[in-house]
Image (tube, grey):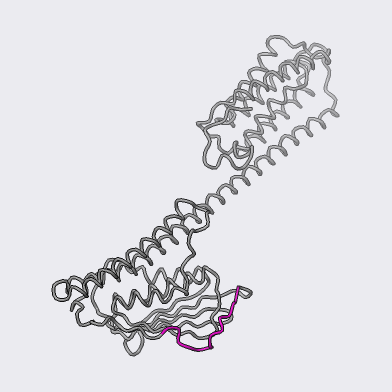
Amino acid sequence: MDEQPPRTPDAGHGGPWGRWAARGSGAALPWRSTVLVAVFVVVGSGFAARNQPDRTALDALGRALLLLGAALLLLRHRHPVPVVFGASAATLAYLALGYAYGPVFVIVAVACFAAVVHGHRHAAWWALGLLWTGHLLLGHWLYRHLPPAGDGPAPWGQELPVAAFVAAILAGSELARIRREQWARDRAERAAAERRRADEERLRIARELHDVLAHSLSVINVQAGVGLALIDSDPGQARTALTTIKAASKEALGEVRQVLDTLRTPGDAPRAPAPGLDRLPELVEQAAAAGLAVRTETEGRRRQLPPGTELAAFRIVQEALTNVVRHSGSRTALVVIRYRADALDLRIDDEGPATGGDAGGSGNGLAGMRERAAALGGTIEAGTRPDGGFRVSAVLPVRPGEPSTASGEPSTAPDEPPVHPPARPQARPSARPEEPQ
């Protein structure tokens, strides 16, 4: 077995052809296989010479030609073209001196195999063609001038086995080349799939962190402004604002920790279930703490949806309410959830108008919502309403046959009563501070 070059990330895939593909100009010389070929050719040619007494006895010159041809195989991976022509020339010289037929052709076979596998198929064909042409000249026209003395012309019938041997070498080499190219394509496809999965996972984590942090920091920022404005005039209300900040930051830390746990232990089941629409009341309470009254309505019969759909719906509503807190001058919002047989419809409305100021966002919120919907085959529409408000509409498909456990609620009923803003909205700062996203 040849000395192997240092393993690459893909070297473990693809079997023996993968190792052939991994070799390059910096690969180690194949000492072991070359020595094995040299020993086999020299010893086998000695036995062949004993069985062919009409040929020239194997002497030092014959052994030197065999060893020379075998030695060229050391460079078959680095310089396959010169090696295949050199091996053919050494074999032709060996036959021209009248030595016995036999294992000498193994040298040519190995050199041809290496040339074809490394992409030099035409060079291998030319080398074999020249060797066969030279053999025809030696056996049928030049035999009078070459040893052994008194040798006659070679029978034409022996050219058929020679042609079959040449065809077998070419066919085996071409098969090896095709297999090597197939393994190379497989490795490239695996590497591309791994990169694609890594990119998708990074995008998913980025969306999760964005949605968690943007919503929580918006609430924290608003409450921090309230606390600063009331810390002297109304310490009790300032304490309430600080309590809300503590609760929002604790929840954000928990969700961020859950996202980061998936990085530390990839493939493991999450320790806590992903958020879904069952946590919508929490969003309503957090929005109320930020001074936003949210009214929710449910249309259709509520049922359990796939976890991915539940998570996407929760994050879309969360991001939409965050944008209302950040960008809208309205203090009210309406969330409508409509369950259909094949889809879940979401609609988030606020009365507007937009504040017109820079709220510190990066502009990734709507893009993240669209990516979440597109990942499920759904759509997102967001834009200004004719009356000056803003609307976010989402359609998330649900595959037929998914779990559908009815909750027994009426087909159209408010999900939560209206939540009013804090008791003292007038104490909020006149200008909301900008919150980073």
Image location of residue 78, percent across then percent down: 55, 30
- Residue 265 location, x and y as percent? 48, 51
Q: Nearer the viewer, residue 43 or 346?
A: 346
Q: For this rendering, which residue is in front, 435 or 155? A: 435
Residue drawn at 25 percent across, 80 percent down? 355
Query: Quarter of the image holding residue 58?
Result: top right
Residue 174 appears left or right of 226: right
Measuring from the top left, give residue 325's x and y in whole percent: 30, 76
Is 36 inside the magenta-drawn segment? Answer: no
Q: Is residue 364 left or right of residue 403?
A: left
Is 366 left, or right, of 79 in this rendering?
left
Rendered position, 437 above or below 126? below
User: Between 223 and 27, which is closer to the camera in this rendering?
Assistant: 223
**Residue 324 percent coordinates (x, y):** 32, 78
- Foreground pick, 401 / 69: 401
Please report the bounds of the magenta region as a residue range.
403-416
